[in-house]
Image: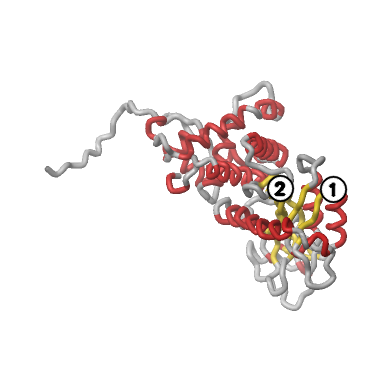
Amino acid sequence: MRGTQNFQGAMFSYISLEERVPAKHPLRKLRSVVDALLASMSAEFEAVYATGGRPSVPPEMLLKALLLQILFSIRSERLLVEAINYNLLYRWFVGLNLEDKVWDHSTFSANRERLFNEDLARVFFERVKLTAGWAKLTSDEHFSVDGTLIDAWASHKSFKRKDASDSDDGAPPQGRNPEVDFKGESRSNDTHASSTDSDARLYKKAQGDKSRLCHMGHILMENRNGLIVDVEVTHASGTAEREAALKMLGRRGGKHKRATVGADKGYDCKAFVRGCRQLKVTPHVAAKDQHSAIDGRTKRHEGYKTSLKVRKRIEEAFGWMKTVGGLAKTKLIGQAKLAGQALMCFAAYNLVRMGSLSQWWDAHHA
């Protein structure tokens, strides 16, 4: 017998959100882990909120919503709030009941400096890293390091001379998006700056590549399971990768142990090799064909060959960050905001990676 459609809405629902989510859904385990991590950050949350006044949206909800945005590649916070409003899975994950009203998307902007800054994001990132260490998923002896470019939310038209006035020769403005011809003009970071994002730099990593306004992100990966153990965001420059790598190696845990670090040929210079040895880290850097700072004694070891092979896994993290995490091009202005976004992105990457290693995260069921 053919059934008929009944569009009459029920006045009451007797099924909870908890029953709507499948028992084996990977977000179940993820939510329990994230809830435990956020509960351990209660003191940090208390420090950034006033003791009186009107109650705000709980910071735990906002941070879990931000994790959803990263994990499901939701391109904007406006779309994120819209999805939480109608998606029962998202409502359940952030902790909203079926009848609860979702906050406005502007709440994220209002809490950007308070909640989504580098300090609190690094606390959450470190909590995730400690959880991985407690589960014996990380190594404190063998690392890899690399950097990547993150496009800034600024166009080439915004890259103007530092000593130029707002209008050329007193001419009236030509609208929001005027035609600009900078062909043949010599432009560099010494003489020009972006009027949209002053932290962005005009840079390219390879010969033949196009120059673009960008920031530079750096990560330190442990080699046992490919988890990210440190993140740094800097201005884009020719020395930024090596300087950030030494900074992250200096912050690593287990400094009393000898360690190794794998890196590509861009790190093969005397300053980086000397800095690594001062930190008791053996530089397993891919050697240049000529004028290499890596001696033959280092290249003879089997560990050197292993490090060069394993270090390529770091590209998986960069690929995930740009395709899933939405950081191929940042939508935030300024290095400070980008640093918090990058830390949250790689914290989410570590959580997914830990779930895969523990066999409770299955992307086909997410």
Please tell me the numbered disc located at residue 70: none
Bin the neighbour count of mark 1 within 10 Å (Cα to Cα): few under 14, some 14-19, many 20 and up: some
Picture quadrant where residue 97 is located = top left
Along the line of sight, the residue nearer the viewer: 2 or 147: 147
Label 1 sits on a secondary structure element that is loop
Please tell me the numbered disc located at residue 279: 1
Q: How many marks?
A: 2
Q: Tell me: residue 110, above or below residue 52.
A: below
Label 2 sits on a secondary structure element that is strand
Q: Tell me: residue 218, above or below residue 122.
A: below
Residue 317 place in picture, x, y as percent? 62, 53
Q: Name the amino acid, label 1.
A: Leu
Label 2 to label 1, Cα distance in Å? 18 Å
Residue 303 place in picture, x, y as percent? 73, 56
* Residue in view at x 16 percent, y 42 percent: 3
Single out the mark in the foreground, 2 or 1: 1
Q: Quadrant of the N terminus?
A: top left
Q: Tell me: residue 303, above or below residue 179.
A: above
* Residue in view at x 65 percent, y 71 percent: 179
Bin the neighbour count of mark 2 within 10 Å (Cα to Cα): few under 14, some 14-19, many 20 and up: many
Please tell me the numbered disc located at residue 231: 2
* Residue in view at x 41 percent, y 34 percent: 23
Q: Name the amino acid, label 2.
A: Val
